[in-house]
């Protein structure tokens, strides 16, 4: 049986993805302002945030609606996606490409998402064990 913690982590992560993805799609300027205050509306950044938004909304929705093997695949991919986001954020900070405070905020957000994805992975492992019985 899947744990409530793992299931809860999956739903929390889905909610975070849906909110952040929607913001990336409909309000990229707000996200850009949070990361790079005073930078203005850089068209490349707006485009990147909209791409990020589409990806993130789809990933969030899949965490909610998928079942069986597809859900297990989505959860596994989430660990890699969020871990790579964490590393990318850390590298931006280490290289001085973002203010230290901004880089730290992004690392903490991405690391939280990684932890949620790892916790949701427990649900995937429990489902696999049930199916093998």
Image: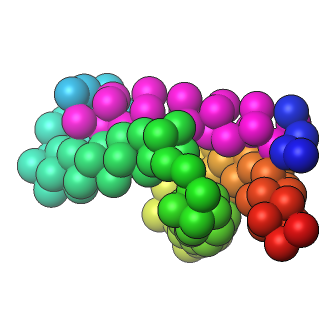
Name which residue lies at 27% across and 47% down.
54
Residue numbers of the magenta segment: 5-25
Instruction: Determine the residue located farthest toward the left in the rendered image.
Output: 43
Examine the structure image and report whether residue 2 is included in the region drawn in magenta: no
Q: Is residue 78 visible?
A: no
Q: Position of residue 97 (x, y in %)?
A: 47, 63
Q: Position of residue 73 (x, y in %)?
A: 57, 67
28 vs 70: above or below? above
The residue closer to the viewer here, 9 or 53, is: 9
Q: How many marks?
A: 0
Q: Quadrant of the C terminus?
A: bottom right
6 vs 96: above or below? above
Query: For this view, does 33 lie left or right of residue 131?
Result: left
Q: Is residue 43 visible?
A: yes
Query: For this view, does 77 lie left or right of residue 129?
Result: left
In terms of image quadrants, where is residue 101? top right
Name which residue lies at 68% across and 41% down.
10
Query: For this view, does 93 lie left or right of residue 111?
Result: left
Name which residue lies at 31% across and 44% down.
53
Main SS class of the magenta portion in the image:
helix
- Visual colour scheme: rainbow
Query: For this view, does 47 lie left or right of residue 35?
Result: left
99 vs 7: above or below? below
């Amino acid at each position: 049986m899947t744990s409530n913690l793992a299931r809860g982590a999956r739903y929390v992560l889905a909610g975070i993805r849906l909110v952040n993805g929607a913001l990336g799609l409909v309000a990229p300027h707000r996200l850009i302002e949070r990361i790079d205050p005073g930078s203005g509306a850089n068209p490349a950044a707006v485009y990147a945030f909209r791409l990020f938004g589409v990806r993130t909304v789809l990933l969030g929705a899949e965490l909610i609606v998928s079942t069986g093997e597809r859900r297990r695949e989505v959860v596994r991919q989430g660990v890699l996606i969020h871990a790579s986001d964490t590393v990318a954020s850390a590298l931006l900070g280490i290289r001085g490409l973002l203010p230290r405070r901004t880089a730290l905020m992004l690392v903490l957000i991405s690391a939280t998402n990684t932890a949620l994805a790892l916790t949701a992975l427990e649900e995937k492992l429990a489902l696999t064990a049930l199916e093998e019985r």
